Every structure is written in C-alpha cells, then in structure tokens.
Image (cartoon, grey):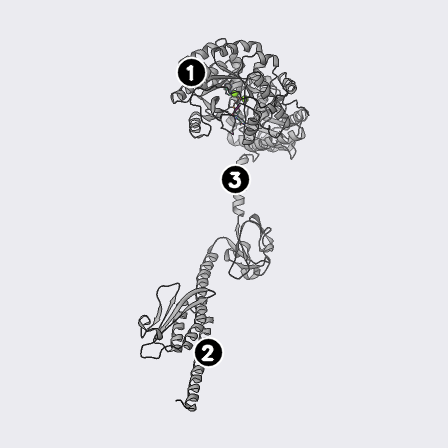
Amino acid sequence: MTTPDAGLQQEIHSLAAEIVHAYEELHLLYELGQVLTSDLGVSEVTSLIVEKILQALTAGDAELRLASSSEPVRVSRANVATAGPDHRLSTTLRSAGEIVGGISLARSPDDEPFSSADGKLLDAVGTLAANAIRNAQLLQELRSNEAHLRAVLDNVAEGIITVDEANCIASFNPAAERIFGYAAADVIGGDVRTLLDSLNPGETIGRQSGDRRFAADVSVGTMRLEHDQPLQIFSVRDITRRKEAEAALEHQALHDALTDLPNRVLLHDRLQQAIRAADRNTTSVALLVMDLDRFKEVNDTFGHHTGDQLLEQLGQRLGSVLRASDTIARLGGDEFAVLLPTAALDEAQQIADRLLQVLEQPFTLGGLQLEIDASIGIALSPDHGHDADTLLRRADVAMYVAKRGNVGHAVYTADQDQHSPMRLAMVSELRRAIDQNELSLYFQPKVSLAAGSVTCAEALVRWQHPRHGLLGPDLFVPIAEQTGLIRPLARWVLDAALRQCSRWRHQGLDLAVAVNLSMRNLHDPEVVDTIRQLLTRWGIPPSRLVVEITESSLMADAERAMDVLGRLRAMGVGISIDDFGTGYSSLAYLKRLPVDELKIDKSFVAHIASDDNDAAIVRSTIGLAHDLGLAVVAEGIEDEVTWDYLAGLGCDVAQGYFISRPLPVAAFGDWLATTQWKPQSSACPTFFIQTVPGDAAPEESQASKILSGRVTRNDRVA
Ligand code: C2E
Ligand code: MG
Ligand code: MG
C-alpha cells in the first residue's frame, strides 16, 4: 500500500519530470528556432538537429534521413536497427505537407525505454526540424541559382532589365548599364518607359543618358518567383550597327556605286509600283530610257576615269530637271532611265526635251570640255505595256529608233519592234537555240475533275538562254512567229513532246500530250504531214496528241484553219481551243470547227469564286460547249475554292498551279509518282465530258453573246 506521502512524492516526481521535459522541450525548441533562422547549409543544419535531439532525449543513437539523399546523418552509440520496440522512437519530417525526411532514435537495452512524452516531444521538434531543413535546402538552391543567375546576368551581352508590375525597374545588369549609359543604382526603382519607346517585343527606340537614341531590339519574358509578384524581363540589344549595315547593304543593292543613283533593281520596283498606282487612278506612267551617243569614244580616248566623272556630272544635271517624285536611275554603262509616275505623253516629251537641253552645255572635266549627245526612248503604261519588263524593253526599242534616226527622242510604236537591234539579235540566237538544243519542254498536267486522274500533259516550251537565263514562250514565240522560225520551233516541240510521250508509254503511262501551235503553223502546208511522220516515228496513236491553238489566232483566219484542223482531226488528233474567251469567237464558226475541247482562259477562272460576271461567263461557256459536244478545260486554277466551284459547274478538266506548275520532265516524273492525281493506266478518253447538272443549265442568251463576241472580259455587264 502506498502512503499519502509516497503518493505525493510520486506526483511531485512526475511533475518535476514534466517540468524538466517542458524545459528541455522549450530549450530544444529555442535552439531549433535558432537553427531555423540561421543561414547554415543543409548538412550543418541536419547535424545540429541530430545533436540537439540526442541531447534532449538522451538517446544512444540517432539518425536523420533526408528524403533527398540516401546517406543518413547518424550519431551512433547503440544501433537503431537492433533496438527493441520500447527503446526505439521515430517520426516523419514534414514541411508544408511534403516529406523532407525522418528521424529515428534508439536507446541501449540497459537504459530506460522511451515514454509517450518522449514521443510527443520528438513529434513536436520534428515539425520544427523539418522546417529548418526545408529552409536550409531552399536557401541553398536559391544561393546556387542566384550565383548562377548573377554570373549569367553579369556576362551576357544583352541588357537585362527586370521590371515589376508597375513598370518599375527592379534590376539592371552590367550590359544594360553599358547599353543605356546609366549606372544600375540610378535607374532601379525608376520607370522603364523612360528607357524604351515601346515595351512590346521587337524593334524600338532606346533612350540613353544624355537623351541620345539608339535602335533597340527587345524581347520580353515573364518570371514568377514563388509567392512573389511576377517580374517582366526585358532583354535589350543595341542593333544600331546592324541597322546601319543593313541600310548600307540595301542602299548598295539598290544604287549604282558610281553615281549613287537608283539602279535597275530599284527602278524596276518603283516602276511596278507606279504602274499599279496609275491603274487605280487611271493615270499613265511614262518611262524614258536614255543612252549617250559616242560615250565609248570618251572612254577610249580620255580613259575610264574621265568617263566616270562625266557620268557622275551627268547624273546630277539630269536630276536637276526632275521633280522629287520622279526617279532617275542608272541602268548600267551609259544608259539611264527616268520614271515619271504620273505623266501623260506630252509631258513625257517635254521632259525628254529638257533632259536633252541640259546636255547641250559642254561638260568640264579636268580642263577638258566635252560635248555629249543622247537619245531617249519613251514608253507609257498602259498604252505600251502593263508591266515593268515590257515597258523597259519598249522604251529601249524606242531609244534605238531615236538613236538610229538621230532625232533626240522617240515614242514607242509596235512596228519599231521589227527593227530593234535586240530583236535582230534574238532572231539569230533563236535560230541557233533550236539547232543547239537550248530549248526544253516543261509539262503541266490536265486533270479530270470528276475522275481526279491525269489525262494529259501540256508541253510548254522554254529557252535556256546563255545570257538572259530561262525565257518563257511569251518572250520568243512572237519573234519566231514573225520570222518563219515558228516552223522549226513547232517541229522541235512536236518531236520532243512525242518522244517524251513514247518514253512514258514504255513506262506504262498512257498519257496524252498537248502541244501549242501558232496560227502560222496551220498556214504551213506541210504541217499535217510533219505531224503524221512524227507520230509514226515515235509510235504514238494520233488520239494521244492534242493540238492547242488560241482562240484569237484561230478566229483571225478561221476559214484557213478549218482545212488543216479538219485533216488533223480526221487522223484522230485532238483539237483544243486555247485561251477561250479572249478572242471573238463566232457561234457560227464554233459549230463548224473541227474541235474537241475548249480551254477557258485563266483570266476568267482566277476570280470565278468572287466575281459574278466571270462566274456567269464560265457557267454559260461550259453549258454551251457541252451542248456542242465539247469538253471544257479550265486553266489557271490556283486554289481549292476555284477547283470546287468549277467541279460544281460541271467543268470537265482542270489545269493550274493548284494541281501543278509546269515542270521540267524529271520533276514532272517525280510529281506523277507522288501525286494524289494518278495518271490513268489504260487507254481512257483524252477528253472528258461531264453531264451538266440540271440547275447549272446554260444561260443561252449570255452564252450566245459570248460566242458571238459581244461579251468579253473588257466589256463587262455592269
Ligand atoms: P497557254 O497554252 O495558255 O499556257 C498556259 C500558260 O499559263 C503557261 O504559261 C502556264 O505556265 C501558265 N499557267 C498555268 N497554270 C497557271 C496558273 O494556275 N496561274 C497562272 N497565272 N498561270 C498559269 P507559259 O508557259 O508562259 O506559256 C504562255 C503561252 O505561250 C502558252 O499559253 C502558249 O499559248 C504559248 N506557248 C507555250 N509553248 C508553246 C509552243 O511550244 N509553241 C507555241 N506556238 N506557243 C507556245
Ligand atoms: Mg496551251
Ligand atoms: Mg491558255
């Protein structure tokens, strides 16, 4: 039995133990609190914790495992693993819900077992310990990140400015100090908008100390630090040098080095723009091309240096005659051009007179007095051409005429083309080109809209000119037509196209080829025989050849064409009317002509989905052609919308960039192998005729107007 004294003693004893415990706890907590706010590294913190806990709980062995490392921090006298359950105590360390690690304690079997108060104490200090460790870890990460970041920020070439939500500058790295010419301390806290004109990414103007400005390239990012407000990071580069270099390069690319006048490239660009603007305002553009007479003699007699000086002075004098909106360019050698963006013919002629007048005064060059003459050719848009190249060529032709006639200046007329030296040169070069295989064929597929298969490849001729590069047919077929070279040209094209057709046949491809012929070819009495021979030579069935002839040339002399086309068709060769809609077909002829196919000109097709007038013309042409038993090809399809629209109208065959551009033969082969539009494998008709859906019935009146030539593209129904 226990005496009351003994009971009291017991109570005092346990109270004392609790007080000691509480004191130890307080002390431990205090010490841990110190650890918590220290800036020690993780390993120091963990060792300290282990030591403190060991002291507080007088255990023989303690180990602390961190979630982030496999090696425990251990202070060992006994062994945690072998201690009995009463002599073992452990807790998990959690900070903000995350497990940071765990602590285990052990006492040797001879010591007192752990009490529940010990357990509570360990749990309590565990929480503090976990926070202390987590803090130490974060601090360490932050330090290494910060050190890294500092190193980067201090060494990058870009100016890095961080800015808070109120646009106040929070940091300013050394490169930013260099770029803006301010010390970080002077701008931190200030508004970043005093430094940059725009805070959007891209190019802007930066403002340096002393209010100097520079071209800046800015990129912007956002950085969000835990718990902090987001910071914007501006990375700024001074691109003044680059801009200057770019500007210099661009200037160099667009100007003549000697006179610093615009060169041919810049003139071409401005000319094209002027033509477009004049189109909108229905005004005209004048282009003057000027060539010095006997400049070569100046060079040869007095040397290039004198020649160069002359050209420089000349450029200045010519400039004095012109307005700021005019362009004077040096095209090369002693050739200059003047662009008058809004001049009509009489004004262009007046300017030409004035330009010649300023040359009348002799030039003084290093004590020499030189007189120089020039010739000027004038061409106007839209009268003489509707693109820069044509206008330049024609002004050049007129210039030659002026020079030959010694008349100062001349205005372009179509008949001058006959005699221009360029043309004469082209004629002899073209003759050689045909003989020496400078010509080549590009092929462009025709695809059946309904079946989606390739029915035919149209051969389009190209000339790989040794100096001018690859020339399209528009540049040399007209010359061939005017000189009789059209006969050997057509023969070359027919031969090459049929040879290719035969190669395809050997590869198992039953592809028809279409060849464009000029009206002049149909006037050739031997053309039918030539075609027959070539078909035999390459073993091609006549049904696999289609002859395309443009509507306008056909209608110019339909009676004569009828005979040849009739004989070709009787042989089985397909006949197609090209560029339909641009000429003035008469219904009467169309009915009688031996024709299988109409190709609607690309100028109608291009805007079909957006232009009601074009749509009406195409719709009625399709209806009419079908009534006459003709297949309809739409050329110049450049997008899917147009394809769909034409399919809806019951058009039979499609051609255009949407399907494929004209391609050299090898590329065409690759295209055939990979395209979704497969070539047909067995003999299929070359001409597809779809039945017209009921609701797309032809509008007879409109259609017959088109066919009798009363409606054309330029003669729109308002
Ligand atoms: P074409 O027979 O009407 O040929 C179509 C022209 O339009 C081709 O120009 C072609 O490259 C172009 N084209 C094709 N698809 C599109 C498109 O989707 N959009 C646009 N904007 N254009 C497209 P290219 O090759 O310059 O031929 C021009 C003309 O020269 C031909 O018009 C044809 O009449 C004639 N031609 C071509 N080769 C010969 C030939 O061997 N002999 C003769 N006499 N004339 C030829
Ligand atoms: Mg054609
Ligand atoms: Mg065409």
Label 2 CB, ligand 1: below 8 Å?
A: no
Q: Is residue 578 magenta?
A: no
Residue type at mark 3 is Leu
Q: Secondary structure at mark 3?
A: helix
Q: Is 327 above or below relative to 569?
A: below
| Category of crowding for the residue at label 3, using alpha-carbon neighbours closer than 10 angstroms: few (below 14), some (14–19), many (at least 20) | few
Q: Residues within 10 Å of mark 1 (few under 14, many from 20)?
A: some
The residue that label 3 is drawn on is 249
**In the rendering, at what x and y percent does residue 340 appear?**
64, 30
State the count of labels.
3
Q: Which mark is residue 26?
A: 2
The residue segment tinted magenta is 651-659
Q: Is residue 147 left or right of residue 419?
A: left
Q: Which residue is mark 1?
A: 540
The amino acid type of the residue labelled 1 equals Ile
**Crowding at label 2, few (<14), some or many (≥20) Cα neighbours within 10 Å?**
some
Question: Mark 1 or mark 2: which is in front?
Answer: 2
